[in-house]
Amino acid sequence: MNFEVLKMGRKESESAFVTKDSGRRAEFDSGMVRDLQKGKPRFDLILPKDLPMKENVLFRWAMLMSRGAEKYGDRNWEKAKGQEELNRFKASAFRHFMQWFVGVDDGEDHAVAVFFNISGAEMVKYKLNVPELEMEWKGTDYED
């Protein structure tokens, strides 16, 4: 028996994803062939090779997120969606930047606080420019 089930406007047999292809190839000594990396994000270049993990800003940011989750709950910051919250993220980012810039050493990791607040601000800016229906569709509304 051959039938197709429609789900959300596409056939179940169709994939929701595509494999992008530049049409250009790199061949390795082993014979493996891959598409080129040119023009693709290089997340592998973000982390300095010789920096110990605990000194890495991404690790420190993850630790900040862990402490925040313990204090406010997982993903609390993602509830932000309005101009008031955007303003708060921006003010905090700037304050922490100034504290980092002048070398305030008060036990708080001001460098990662800058990253956190800019990330929050960018998320809210996105939410302010996306219709509410689309936001719900993407699963960004979190319940308490």
Image: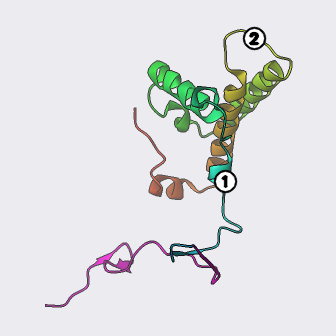
Q: Amino acid at mark 1?
A: Asn
* Side of 29 relative to 84 (left or right): left
Furthest toward the right, the residue is 102
x then y, percent, for residue 94:
79, 28
Q: Amino acid at mark 2?
A: Asp
User: Which mark identifies residue 76?
Assistant: none
Badge nearest the viewer, 2 or 1: 2
What residue is drawn where x is 51% and y is 77%? 31
What residue is drawn where x is 68% and y is 44%? 122
Find residue 56 and report its image quarter: top right
Q: Are marks 2 and 1 in contact (CB under 8 Å)?
A: no
User: Which mark identifies residue 129?
Assistant: 1
Q: Residues within 10 Å of mark 1 (few under 14, many from 20)?
A: few
Q: Secondary structure at mark 1?
A: loop
x then y, percent, for residue 52:
61, 30
Q: Secondary structure at mark 2?
A: loop
* Side of 100 relative to 63 (left or right): right
Furthest toward the bottom, the residue is 2
x then y, percent, for residue 62:
55, 31
Magenta-highlighted residues = 1-28
